[in-house]
Image: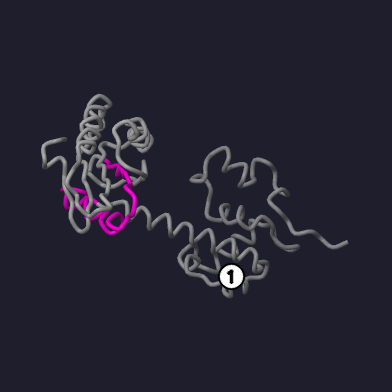
Amino acid sequence: MGMKPLTIRDFPLNERPRERMLKEGAHALSNQELLAILLRSGTKQESVLQLSQKLIGRFEGLNLLKDATIDELTSVKGIGNAKAVEILASLELGKRVNQLKIEERYVIRSPEDGAKYVMDEMRFLSQEHFVCIYLNTKNQVLHKKTVFIGSLNASIVHPREVFKEAMRRSAASIICFHNHPSGDPNPSREDIDVTQRLTECGKIIGIDLLDHIIIGDQKFVSLKEKGYV
């Protein structure tokens, strides 16, 4: 019988990357160990850790690996199509996460900044969407969430849904938006009631509602500027 490829399971328990990651966290693992987790098994001649180290050496660490192609990866003995695809999928996810972080640095300093951030997305919606943007202490966008879809009503837009996400994200403040499908952003009585209710709740919780902006067709109304926040 031929030798089986060496896997992570062939290593002592305290040296296995998966077990170390569970115990110490991903940050404690080297690039070699993280790659070994993705590869899962080595070859008959090399352990999975040796294979991952060879891969890192071939691509100068992560420098060239982040832009590697399937052909370049499979040129390394022990890396087949399946392993190459898993590596590239993981790298692509990392790139997308990094891009998200860049986009989230958008800073809102004025009602115009807020309206610009959502205008293209919200101006053509056929139903009313109530959207919240959660900000840090520097007024940078941490997260955006659609809280409710439908006609705005103070009894339906619950403060708990708005502020639950704020606490989950450790937000310092919130800006709320909703669109008027008619294209006319002038506030209704319900819009004003919802705004005042959220403002009061924010003061109690300690997370400020900075503004409630109504989006029309290339027009907007800031309820803060109208004196309702």
Q: Position of residue 9 (x, y in %)?
A: 71, 48
Mark 1: give few (<14), some (14-19) or many (20+) Cα within 10 Å: many
Q: Position of residue 106 (x, y in %)?
A: 26, 53
* 192 to 32, vertically: above or below: above
Residue placed most toward the observer, 195 or 28:
195
Q: Position of residue 86 (x, y in %)?
A: 59, 61
Q: What residue is drawn where x is 32% and y is 51%?
A: 104
For the N terminus, the quadrant is bottom right
- Residue 146 counted in the magenta span: no
Residue placed most toward the observer, 70 or 37:
70
Q: What residue is drawn where x is 23% and y is 51%?
A: 215
What residue did someone put label 1 on? 73
Label 1: element kind: helix
Which amino acid does the dot numbered 1 rest on? Leu
Q: Is residue 202 left or right of residue 18?
A: left
* 191 to 94, vertically: above or below: above
- Residue 122 counted in the magenta span: yes
Q: What residue is drawn where x is 47% and y is 69%?
A: 67
